[in-house]
Amino acid sequence: MSRYRSPYVSSYALGPGPLSTMMKALIGANVGMFLLVSIFQSLQVWLGLIPEAVVRGFYVWQLVTYMFVHAGIFHLLFNMLVLWMIGTELERMWGMRYFLKFYFVTGIGAGVLTVLISLLPFGFAAALYHAVIIGASGAIFGLLLAYALYFPDRLIYMYFLFPIKVKYFVAILGAIELYSSLAVQSGVASATHLGGLIVGYLYLKGARIDPIAEIKYRYIKWKVNRARKKFDVYSGGRPDDWNRRVH
């Protein structure tokens, strides 16, 4: 847990600092949905992610709404704590718009991967196909992956006791979720957690190579080379230009 020092206040505060307006809205939406589902528990079936319902009933909204439904107070508190601790620093670095885009891309992407995995012809997939998957953990695991890529050597305390570098911590989490999704039948949607890690990695790695910018670069390079040949311009001079004029 890092310490944040405000430029306007001389005292220190635990954590990454105050919540931004966007972070307050995101956490508030999760808390509000938790209270609503606690009162009307039947909403969990409509808002949670059920792969069978998405495939057969076209309940595509569940790919978004499942991120705001939580199983209990501790499930909610853990996800919101990580969202605040990790998300606040990433939002400062990325800006609000990119952060929100990444959050929903990883959350929805994790849901889509969960549905696809549930269609595989294996025992663990059959159980996942009929399960009700809830929680922001897909997006949260995406944020953890991003944090590990940007701050790989930063220390965090596993179980609040053991210091470990973020890159190793996330690698351990990924290995655990992969094993759990394949071998363990539990109430935890490990496939969704793993999906958040995969989508986060692919999104960030793909964002570093902008296909449109790459096409523009190749086109401009082609035009420059064409102009050089047209006007008889060669980088470093022509091989047979031994008597060239010096300007």
Image (spheres, rainbow, N blue to C red):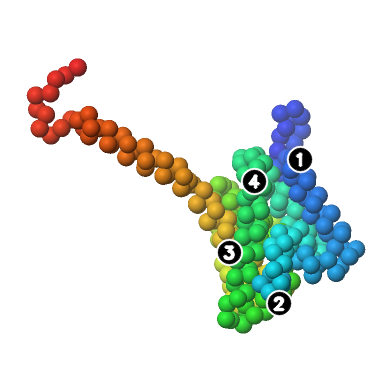
**Among the two numbered marks 4 and 3 on one chain, the one whose residue lies closer to the N terminus:** 4
Label 3 Cα crowd, 10 Å radius (few <14 / some 14-19 / many 20+): many
- Tell me residue 170's x, y (percent): 59, 58
Task: Tell me the SS state at disc 4.
Answer: helix
- Inter-mark Cα distance, 3 to 2: 24 Å
**Among the two numbered marks 2 and 4 on one chain, the one whose residue lies closer to the N terminus:** 4
Label 2 Cα crowd, 10 Å radius (few <14 / some 14-19 / many 20+): some
Amino acid type, label 2: His
Badge 3 vs badge 2, beta-carbon distance below 8 Å: no
Label 1 Cα crowd, 10 Å radius (few <14 / some 14-19 / many 20+): few
What residue do we see at 67% from left, 79% from top?
A: 127
Q: Is residue 236 visible?
A: no
- Inter-mark Cα distance, 1 to 3: 31 Å
Amino acid type, label 1: Thr
Label 4 Cα crowd, 10 Å radius (few <14 / some 14-19 / many 20+): some
The numbered disc on residue 174 is 3
- Inter-mark Cα distance, 2 to 4: 32 Å
The numbered disc on residue 21 is 1
What residue do we see at 74% from left, 43% from top?
A: 22
Q: Is residue 110 above or below residue 219?
A: below
What residue do we see at 61% from left, 60% from top?
A: 109
Amino acid type, label 3: Gly
